[in-house]
Image (cartoon, rainbow, N blue to C red):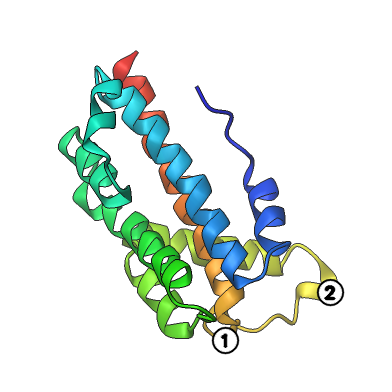
Amino acid sequence: MIDLISNEKFLEDLQQEDELGAVIRAHLYIERIVNEILRVVVPFPESLKSLCLDFNGKLSVICAMGMKEETKKCFSQIGRLRNRFAHEPNYRLTKSDTNSLYKSLEKEDKNLVQKCYRDLSGSSPEWKDMPQFKKLSARDQFTLIAIVVKTIAVNVLSDARSKSA
């Protein structure tokens, strides 16, 4: 069983990193949760080790065990971003990257990103004049979306645990 960090700690960790570190760290946290989901939903998860599954392979197994295919999209998009940073020296996060990640979310998750941003911008007087979400930097957009993707992963894990109990 893994210990899950709070969204506040996750945000703090991502903000301490440069773009490369933020994307890699977000992926690491999410993959850790994906690994725990596998442990919960597969009766004999140690049997999967010989398959040497990559991240997308793990997601496919989880979908085969009941996760909605739509949920896989945002996890896969985080994986694609991680690969860009891992394989392209000096890669920079772009608005196109964050737009693709945002578009990979289901409607209610997009609404959650917007709600989180509204809550954040209304939580302090110095943040009341923050720009609209779409006008934020790619880095800031990524951070907010990554928090929601992590939350989705935690919810999938919670659902898996309740079904296996």
Identify residue for label 1.
135
User: Label 2 sits on what residue type?
Assistant: Glu
x and y percentages locating residue 93 in the rendered image: 51, 79
The residue shown at (53%, 69%) is 142
- Residue 25: image quadrant is bottom right
The residue shown at (72%, 55%) is 12
The residue shown at (50%, 80%) is 91
Q: Is residue 136 above or below residue 83?
A: below
For this rendering, which residue is in front, 163 or 132? 163
x and y percentages locating residue 86 in the rendered image: 46, 66
x and y percentages locating residue 89 in the rendered image: 50, 78
The circle on residue 86 is none
Estimate how packed mark 2 is, as few (under 14), some (14 to 19) or many (20 or more) residues with alpha carbons within 10 Å.
few
Q: Exactly how many numbered labels are in the figure?
A: 2
Q: Taking 88 as reference, is 3 left or right?
A: right
For this rendering, which residue is in front, 63 or 58? 58
Quote the CA–CA distance across marks 1 and 2: 17 Å
Outermost residue toward the top? Answer: 165
Identify residue for label 2.
126
